[in-house]
Amino acid sequence: MSDAYTLVVFGGAIVALVLLIAKFKVHPVATLFVIVTTLGLVLGLGGEKTLKLVTEGFGSTMSSVGLLIVFGCVLGKMLELSGAALRITEEALRWFSGRKIPWAIALASAVVGIPLIADTVVLMLIPVVSAIAMRSGMSMMRLGPILYIGAYVMTSLVPPGPGPLAASALLGVDLGQAMLYGALVGIPGIIVATLDLLTIRTYVAPKAEYVDHLPAAEGRAGLAGRGTGTGGTQDADGTPGTQESAGTGGTTLTQEATGTDTGAGRLPSLRLSLVPIFVPILLIMLDSYVVDMVGEKSSLGGVLHFLGAPLMALFIGCLTALPLFGRDWRRKSTLNDLFEAGLKLAALPLALTGVGGALALIIRDTKVADGAADVIRDMGLSPIIVPFLVAAAICTITGSNILGVMTAAAIMEPLMAGLGISALAVYLACGTGAQIMKHANSSGFWVTTTLSNMTVGQGIRSIGVASAISGVTGFAILYVLYAMGLV
């Protein structure tokens, strides 16, 4: 079997993968299974060996990442249902005021977006952001996409989000490095994308259903009458000319927008809200960067290595989230039902990751990787560009950043040795490429566009452009690190 035939089949498999998901709307898990088994048969592995490799690839991947994804999804669900995400947002708004409010939204979204999927962050916090828009006169065409983009970037690059968690496992990347370098590459992308969104001058009012119940505020009549119109007077920063952009206390806005009496302590404290997010990160970082210095065989090193193992660290994160529920932590609704909700959330990432592991094993066994690496070298492309382009193509065509980073990681894992590129560099390239670009085939695009009261065109101008900017910015940072030999 010639290398040319192998590469043509592999290229056709990728095209078929994208078409089945994007055009024919076949479920990603079913699509990946069909592609993996067909690839094995067409490349001459035979039915028995193909199924054996699929089972082995799925099983080995699940053994390394299965419980990680489960605990990560359970942790995210606990932060969502306990009100911790709202508390973090509330405190971020307390620290910022006036024209700095968009940066408070970006900060809160980035922090909450570490364990939560971006769509969930928007669904949770859009009432608060809508209240801010009404009170400050800022456009939802700015604030809605800013709310989305912070979480979107972090959930594409930083574990324990299901996409980056699965990609790091598929590539064999140390989780501490994935967290540290993911944030290093992702945060500049959030900043640059937010700066771009702040240049938007089109005014879009919040949806009436989010603000009609709020107390009367200055200029509210003007806001209610605008809808999604782009007319009306505007000042230099895109707010209506009839209003001044003024900050409002985060507590009042959160309470009014969500109907939660924060003064009565029904939301957890900021300290309790942040602990479940940063304790697992801290433990994993200690294992990655401190254990080697103190020695794994020492008493301290042994303890840190055990507690900082990703599986144990994420489970400890779930335990530290129990106090968020106050006295209700002992109830069945917390100890059992909430865990089941997390398991349901983990089902899709688990299945995608397992079949992705099977795809990587098929590619390795059929020697596709060797031929592809040779072609890439002959073309003179920088190896770091390849995973970026693969992830960008999958995300743009299918509309899923999670599918983009996971599938690109599965495709690239067998190619790493031939290309002479580190697993960390491939991981970061997949994570930045998987941000490009959100448009009308994405659930996150529709959630943010609809709830922010924007038209499709306004959504593409704001969310689509901002996601492309964040991905390109992150990749530029990565390219510098790669050129310097740091990744």
Image (tube, grey):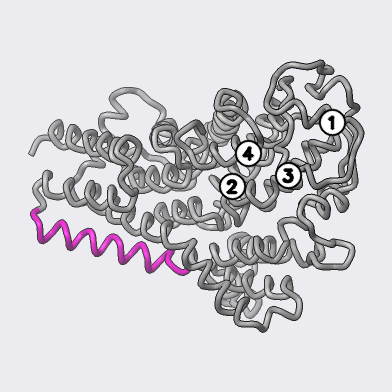
Which residue is at 31% across, 56% downward? 355
User: Is 282 or 397 nearer to us in this picture?
Assistant: 397
Real-space CA distance between mark 4 and mark 2, rounded to the nearest whole angstrom? 8 Å
For disc 1, the marked residue is 221
Q: Earlier in the sequence, mark 1 or mark 4?
A: 4
Q: Secondary structure at mark 3?
A: helix
Would you say residue 296 is visible in this rendering? no
Q: Amino acid at mark 3?
A: Tyr
Give coordinates of residue 460: x percent, y percent: 56, 26
For disc 2, the marked residue is 118
User: Is 389 or 213 nearer to us in this picture?
Assistant: 213
Real-space CA distance between mark 2 and mark 1, rounded to the nearest whole angstrom? 32 Å
Q: Secondary structure at mark 1?
A: helix
Label the magenta part by its dominant secondary structure. helix
For disc 4, the marked residue is 149
Would you say residue 456 is visible in this rendering? yes
Give coordinates of residue 163: x percent, y percent: 48, 51
Q: Amino acid at mark 2?
A: Ala
Q: Amino acid at mark 1?
A: Ala
For disc 3, the marked residue is 210
Q: Are marks 3 and 4 in contact (CB under 8 Å)?
A: no
Figure label count: 4
Residue 320 within the magenta-colored segment of the rendering:
no
Query: Which stretch did the figure color magenta?
Result: 46-67
Q: Earlier in the sequence, mark 3 or mark 2?
A: 2
